[in-house]
Amino acid sequence: MLNRLIVFFITVSAATAQITDSPLISEILKNFKPEFPNIFSAPDQYKLQIIYTQVNRDRNNVPELETHTYRLKPREYFYPASTIKFPIAVLAMEKLNSIENVDQYTSLNILTEIPGLEGVLEDKTSRTGLPSIAHYIHKLFVVSDNDASNRLYEFLGRDYLHQRLWDLGYTETRIRHRLDIALSKKQNRYTSPFRFFHDGSIIYEQPSQKAKIDLDVNYNDYLIGKAHMKNGNRIEQPFDFSKKNFMSLMEQQYFLIQVMFPETAPEDKQLNLTEDDYKFLYGKMSLLPRESKYPLYEDNDHYYDGYCKFFMFGDTKERIPDHIRIYNKVGLAHGFLVDNAYVVDVKNKVEFFLSAVLYVNQNEILNDNTYEYNEISIPFLAALGNAVYRFELKRVKDVLPDLTRFEIGNK
């Protein structure tokens, strides 16, 4: 029943231009609509989409999901920014299980072979001083480190990454390029060679790879804005996102549900992850900067608790209470703000999935670094998270959830 519910939701959503808004989520939004009159009077302008999934448990603690949406448009383009790091991290973890004698802690080197791509021989921020898949995943989640994500993208290779996503059912997703480094389309097809080693001996080598799969455009409205900046010059044309990454909000939330509740996926769509793998991922996904030891993030004014937790806490530098854990991945770039989260309150027996995207760019110029994140979108996502959380606190459940599985993980 549960598997059919989720698959049906994905199939219908992908084939429909717009889903009817849920009366329940519309009711929740009423509580804070007066705070954001411009957004709710012109949601198309702000490209707002919201998916809220309730979790109910039976007497065996098996989850049953009920999804509610607001302005869901699965093929309307938005730039996913760092949210695409989530499937990259999970699939990198999964790929390790196909390599003998290598795990997430195995030390590695990345060689310099492809022009424009730099290798890596050490990582002074890790406990050992050497790079590893575990350390890259750690940095990717705790502070959304771009280089860490790029290295995992290289480990996977673009063809492997997409074929695996498509095999799992995420057929609309396109991850075409690395983040925060200027590379050509050709360079983003290539990866650098990897070497994994133990006690000075090489135990696995992965050669450079070249992506061959063409990633066609599969979404609408990828020309955004009225102008954009390029090399310091203003170009009087919309910015073309057709060669950029894309992962719909719907596929983002379903991938999160699959990771948090592996039992909900059909048997032929299961991730090849062990229980220890999931525990490792949960620990990293919910970890706060102040809880990290390697690296040690000492600048609390910059790396505050809500730094990568936009729902509920993005607009405050106050500490997140210990009984609340947020398993998520955020994204912020080109005026788009995205959060995809599973929120757990072990004290009050609250759990829910919430995903949202919002676009803020009042001057309609892309790449000028003038966006209203702090003024509009971050406060909005914080308010949205709190509105859903307050609703969940009051929601009556037949069976209270056992949330011991989602305890604070390793650091």
Image (cartoon, grey):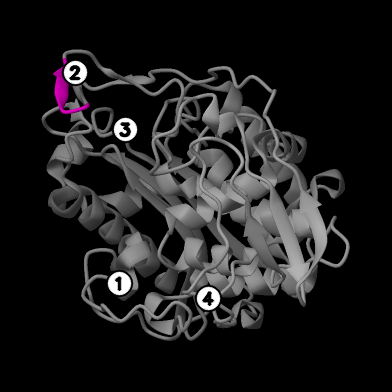
Above or below 380: residue 314: below
Q: Residue at x 77, y 77 (%)?
A: 199
Where residue 217 sits in the image (x, y, percent)? 53, 18
Q: CA distance from mark 1 to mark 2?
A: 34 Å
Q: Which mark is residue 303?
A: 1
Vertical position of residue 362 compared to residue 388: above or below: above
Real-space CA distance between mark 1 and mark 3, rounded to the nearest whole angstrom: 28 Å
The tag on residue 202 is none
Of marks 4 and 3, which one's residue comes earlier in the chain? Answer: 3
Q: Are marks 3 and 2 in contact (CB under 8 Å)?
A: no
Query: Which residue, given by chain and number where applicable, does mark 3 sit on?
Result: 47
In the rendered image, the quadrant that contains the C terminus is bottom right
Q: Which residue is mark 4?
A: 126
Q: Is 88 or 390 nearer to us in this picture?
A: 88
Q: Earlier in the sequence, mark 1 or mark 2?
A: 2
Q: Earlier in the sequence, mark 2 or mark 4?
A: 4
Element assignment for label 3:
loop
Between the C-alphas of marks 4 and 1, the distance is 18 Å
Residue 226 tag number:
2
